[in-house]
DNA sequence: TTGTTTTATATGATATCGCATATTATATTT
DNA sequence: AAATATAATATGCGATATCATATAAAACAA
């Protein structure tokens, strides 16, 4: 077991719970990998929630707030505030839905669309580097697993 | 493409960027899956960062702050404050390292260890349910991928 | 030793986040 | 139609998270 207790401290690995725990592995992998890219976008003056909003809108413009919040992995009230800031910066615009005026739909401005495009390009490049760095060839398989997982969890709750 | 424009809105899927983007898949899967369990622990009056600290200490008691922060996926200054609260609640104790008195080592109290044990039991049960719900048999493979990914990212930066 | 640099943690100020609820609009019931 | 219920977004506030830096100890250099 405890190989070498003579060296003072730290880095045991042993039979921990967390390092075999699916949710921890997911959170940890996500945290570390995203961390890399998040530094990159901070460099472009964009915060994580903003990047998520931009990416989601680029895929699907004019989403309503609640829906967009789900996709961008944040709370509705927080998205509302993020949208306020992004509106001030001229990245998005609000437009209330004609058919149901409770709904507010969010659209990319020209400026926002350009920025989103740039960031997506950077993200793609980063993803490519990352996958190469990981030296993994079963990426498609993993992505498939994650997609199915997401789909299941979205529908079952 | 746009099957049926007669139905008012939403749920397009199409050729989005994000739903094939590794970092988004990871973040999303983590968010959704962890969300389930996080509700559970909130019910036990425990917050997410606290749960992480408890689990990490249970695996490896007496870690120093900086190290623990990395494992618990949070910032050092935030961990310091979390430790303050957990100390007040009698879940952990600080003890400064004899050999190097800059270092502060965090230990579970009896109460903390019990709580950690309970939560780990709950987490295991939840994980089992989750994996069954997902109907996945290649879990081991996915865990392997994630572990390798984490290891790579931890070492390469 | 003394001065300088590096490392580990804590602190204070600020921004973000999330909960509860207010507001406004639509649906439903009577 | 009026009353009630439900839905979508916004708002206020308290908690949390983060940044920059302070404090303190150790390592290193002179």
Image: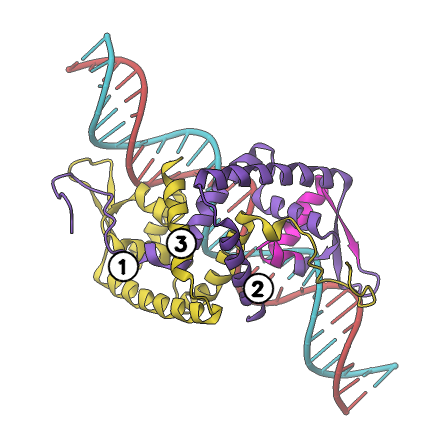
Chain colours: A purple, B yellow, C red, D cyan
**Rounded to the nearest whole Å, what is the CA distance between mark 1 and mark 2?**
40 Å
Q: Secondary structure at mark 2?
A: helix
Q: Position of residue B149 (x, y in %)?
A: 41, 46
Q: Position of residue B127 (x, y in %)?
A: 39, 66
Q: Secondary structure at mark 3?
A: helix
Q: Are marks 2 and 3 on the same chain?
A: yes
Q: Chain of mark 1?
A: B
In the drawing, does residue A67 fall left or right of residue B148?
Answer: right
Q: Nearer the viewer, residue B45 or A2?
A: A2
Q: Chain of mark 2?
A: A
Question: Visible in this render: residue B153?
Answer: yes
Quadrant showing the C terminus of chain B: top left
Q: Secondary structure at mark 1?
A: loop
State the residue position of label 2: A151
Q: Position of residue A23 (x, y in %)?
A: 42, 59
In front: label 1 or label 2: 2
Q: Nearer the viewer, residue C6 or B36?
A: B36
**Rounded to the nearest whole Å, what is the CA distance between mark 2 and mark 3?**
19 Å
Q: Are marks 1 and 2 in contact (CB under 8 Å)?
A: no
State the residue position of label 3: A25
Q: Residue, x 58% and y 55% (percent of image)?
A: A74
**Rounded to the nearest whole Å, what is the CA distance between mark 3 and mark 1?**
28 Å
Q: Chain of mark 3?
A: A
| Residue D29 quadrant | top left
Q: Is residue A44 magenta?
A: no
Span colored in magenta: A68-96
Q: Residue, x 37% and y 41% (percent of image)?
A: B154
State the residue position of label 1: B90
Q: Residue, x 47% and y 71% (percent of image)?
A: B133
Q: Are marks 3 and 1 in contact (CB under 8 Å)?
A: no
């Amino acid at each position: 077991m405890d190989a070498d207790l003579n060296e003072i401290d730290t880095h045991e690995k042993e039979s921990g719970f967390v390092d075999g725990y699916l949710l921890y592995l997911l959170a940890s992998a996500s945290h570390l990998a995203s961390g890399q890219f998040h530094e990159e976008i901070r460099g472009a003056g964009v915060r994580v929630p903003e990047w998520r909003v931009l990416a989601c809108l680029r895929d699907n413009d004019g989403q309503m707030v609640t829906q967009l919040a789900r996709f961008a992995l944040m709370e509705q009230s927080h998205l509302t505030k993020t949208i306020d800031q992004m509106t001030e910066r001229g990245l998005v615009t609000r437009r209330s839905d004609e058919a149901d005026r409770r709904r507010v739909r969010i659209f990319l401005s020209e400026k926002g669309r350009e920025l989103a495009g740039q960031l997506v390009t950077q993200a793609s490049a980063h993803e490519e580097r990352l996958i190469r760095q990981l030296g993994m060839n079963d990426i498609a398989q993993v992505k498939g697993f994650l997609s199915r997982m997401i789909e299941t969890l979205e529908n079952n709750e």
